[in-house]
C-alpha cells in the first residue's frame, strides 16, 4: 500500500509538472512493486495514466494553459494507433513486453534530456503558430500535417501496446511541429493522453486480462493528487531540475526492467 501511494504521487507529479514521463513508471511499479504480470500492469497503467491526465487537465484548464481543440485534433489521429496497439499487446509474452518497455524507458530518458538541453539553450518557440489546417479560408501545411499524423499514430501505438500516455512524444511534437510554448504543450498533451488511454482501455476490456483493481485504484488516487500538485509546482518551480532528476530515475528503472526481462 505504501509503495502504491508513493509511486502514484510521483507519477502524478511528473504528469502535472512536465506533461509526461510519469506514466513510464506505472508499469514497473505494478510489476515489481505490486506483483502484477506485465499484461495486468499495462492494462492497469491505462487507468492510472488516464485518470491522472484528466485530473491534471482540469487543473491546467483553470490556469488557461490548455488548447483543447489542438489536443483533440492530435488525439483523433492517435486513437487508431491505440486500438492497434491494444490488440497487439494481448498477443505477446510478458518478457517481450518488459523488454520493449525497458527500451522505451531509455528512449524517454534521452528525449527528456534533449528537451532540457534545448530549453537551456533557449530553443523553445516563443509563441503559438497558426493551425496546420484551416477551413475559412482553406489552408493546409501538408508536410507539417504528415509529421503530426506519424507522431500521433506512434503515440497511440505506444499507449495501446505498453499502457503509457506518450506525453514524452506528444509534448515535443506540440512544441516543434505546432509551435506551442512548452507550458501550453505540457498542458495540452494531457488532452491527448486522456483520450488515447480511454480508447486503449476500452479495447483491452474484452481481452480477459484483469489486474488487481484495488491496487490500481489506490495507485490512481495517489497519482491524481500528485497531478494536481504537479500543475502548481510547474508554475512556482523551474521544471529543469525536476526533469533532470526524473530522467536519472527513468534510466535506473529502465536498467532494472531490462535485467528482469532478460532473466
Image: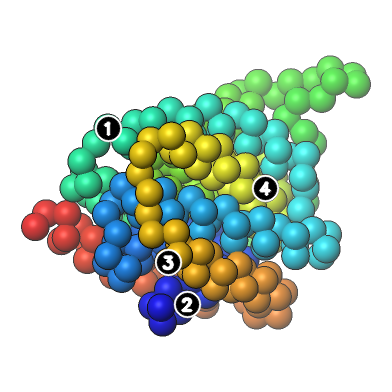
Report the disc number at residue 15.
none
Name the residue: 63% across, 26% down: 145
| Callout 4: SS | helix
Q: Is residue 50 left or right of residue 255?
A: right
**Residue 5 bears which disc, if any?**
2
Mark 3 highlights which residue? 215
Check whether the beta carbons of the residues at disc 4 and disc 1 lie within 8 A of each other.
no
Would you call the spot at circle 4 few (<14 residues within 10 Å), some (14-19), or many (20 or more)?
A: many
Q: CA distance from mark 2 to mark 1?
A: 31 Å
Q: Residue 4: percent from the left, percent from the top?
A: 42, 73
Density class for disc 2 (Cα within 10 Å; few <14, some 14-19, many ≥20) is some
Q: Which residue occupies the foreground of this view, 46 or 180?
A: 46
- The residue that disc 1 covers is 91
User: Which mark sits nearer the N-terminus, 2 or 1?
Assistant: 2
Toward which corner of the image does residue 146 lie, by quadrant? top right
Q: Tell which circle, 4 or 1, labels the residue nearer the N-terminal end.
A: 1
Q: Earlier in the sequence, mark 2 or mark 3?
A: 2
| Res. 191 mark | 4
Nearer-N-terminus badge (1/3): 1
Residue 156: x %, y % from top left: 50, 36
Q: Left or right: where does residue 82 sit relative to residue 1?
A: right
Amino acid at each position: 500500500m505504501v509503495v502504491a501511494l508513493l509511486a502514484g504521487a510521483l507519477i502524478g507529479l511528473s504528469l502535472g509538472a512536465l506533461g509526461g514521463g510519469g506514466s513510464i513508471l506505472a508499469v514497473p511499479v505494478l510489476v515489481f512493486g505490486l506483483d502484477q504480470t506485465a499484461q495486468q500492469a499495462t492494462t492497469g497503467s491505462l487507468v492510472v495514466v488516464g485518470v491522472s491526465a484528466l485530473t491534471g487537465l482540469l487543473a491546467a484548464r483553470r490556469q488557461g494553459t490548455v488548447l483543447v481543440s489542438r489536443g483533440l485534433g492530435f488525439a483523433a489521429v492517435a486513437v487508431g494507433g491505440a486500438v492497434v496497439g491494444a490488440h497487439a499487446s494481448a498477443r505477446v509474452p510478458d518478457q517481450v513486453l518488459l523488454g520493449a518497455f525497458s527500451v522505451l524507458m531509455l528512449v524517454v530518458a534521452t528525449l527528456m534530456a534533449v528537451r532540457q538541453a534545448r530549453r537551456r539553450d533557449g530553443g523553445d518557440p516563443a509563441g503559438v503558430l497558426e493551425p496546420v489546417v484551416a477551413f475559412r479560408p482553406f489552408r493546409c501545411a501538408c508536410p507539417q500535417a504528415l509529421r503530426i499524423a506519424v507522431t500521433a499514430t506512434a503515440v497511440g501505438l505506444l499507449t495501446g501496446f505498453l499502457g503509457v500516455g506518450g506525453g514524452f512524444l506528444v509534448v515535443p511534437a506540440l512544441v516543434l511541429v505546432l509551435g506551442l510554448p512548452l507550458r501550453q504543450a505540457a498542458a495540452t498533451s494531457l488532452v491527448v493522453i486522456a483520450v488515447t488511454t480511454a480508447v486503449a482501455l476500452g479495447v483491452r476490456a474484452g481481452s480477459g486480462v484483469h489486474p488487481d483493481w484495488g491496487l490500481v485504484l489506490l495507485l490512481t488516487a495517489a497519482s491524481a493528487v500528485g497531478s494536481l500538485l504537479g500543475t502548481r509546482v510547474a508554475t512556482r518551480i523551474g521544471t529543469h531540475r525536476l526533469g533532470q532528476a526524473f530522467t536519472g530515475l527513468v534510466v535506473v528503472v529502465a536498467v532494472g526492467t531490462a535485467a528482469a526481462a532478460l532473466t
